[in-house]
Image: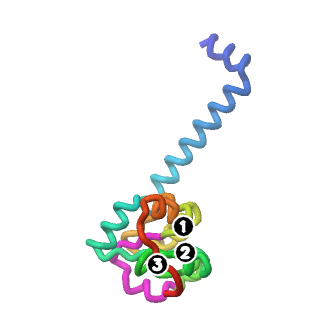
């Protein structure tokens, strides 16, 4: 045990970096375990859309949505979700809901809010439309 204490004292910065990484890893695991949604990949998304009546909710800006979005996706801004204005999404409470943003980072809060609002099967596209584009899947361009 004395050797560990000596190592820690002699390599304080390295030891603190390792402790910091460990804490960040544990926090990430806890966040994933307590999230009200699950992360899915593009293959799972296409399966949900094609076989389980999945509804894609695109939370990007109106301009980003017009530049390209997944077929049949609904455009709902995060501010509308926070305010509880779900529009036509209300009709899909028991259907799979897949929240999409550009990279998958901004959609986390919206996905949690939808789950808290009573939507039963909320998912988040991991890496967002970036992953969709990398898989060379089609986007609809222009106004929907």
Which residue is the site of mark 2? 59
Q: Quadrant of residue 12?
A: top right
Which quadrant is the N terminus positioned in? top right
Q: Residue at x 37, y 66 (%)?
A: 45
Percent from the top left, x then y, of residue 111? Answer: 49, 68
Q: Which mark is residue 84?
A: none
Q: Are marks 1 and 2 in contact (CB under 8 Å)?
A: yes
Mark 1 nearby-residue class (10 Å; few <14, some 14–19, many ≥20) = many
- Tell me the element at label 1: helix
- Tell me the element at label 3: loop
Percent from the top left, x then y, of residue 26? Answer: 54, 42
Range of residues picked out in magenta: 86-99
Q: Which mark is residue 107?
A: 1
Q: Quadrant of residue 55?
A: bottom left
Mark 3 nearby-residue class (10 Å; few <14, some 14–19, many ≥20) = some
Q: What is the C-alpha distance between the residues marked 3 and 2?
A: 15 Å
**Looking at the image, is mark 1 or mark 2 earlier in the sequence?**
2
Q: Residue at x 67, y 32 (%)?
A: 17
Percent from the top left, x then y, of residue 123? Answer: 42, 65
Which residue is the site of mark 3? 140
Q: Quadrant of residue 65?
A: bottom right
- Tell me the element at label 2: loop
Choose between 58 and 112: the one closer to the eye: 58
């Amino acid at each position: 045990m004395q050797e560990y204490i000596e190592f820690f004292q002699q390599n304080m910065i390295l030891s603190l970096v390792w402790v910091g990484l460990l804490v960040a890893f544990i926090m990430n695991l806890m966040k994933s375990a307590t999230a009200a949604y699950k992360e899915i990949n593009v293959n799972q998304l296409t399966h949900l859309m094609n076989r389980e009546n999945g509804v894609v909710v695109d939370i990007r800006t109106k301009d980003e949505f017009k530049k390209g979005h997944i077929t049949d996706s609904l455009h709902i801004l995060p501010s509308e979700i926070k305010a509880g204005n779900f529009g036509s999404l209300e009709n899909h409470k028991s259907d799979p809901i897949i929240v999409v943003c550009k990279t998958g980072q901004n959609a986390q809060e919206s996905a949690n809010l939808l789950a808290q609002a009573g939507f039963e099967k909320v998912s988040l596209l991991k890496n967002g439309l970036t992953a969709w584009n990398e898989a060379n899947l089609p986007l609809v361009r222009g106004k929907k």
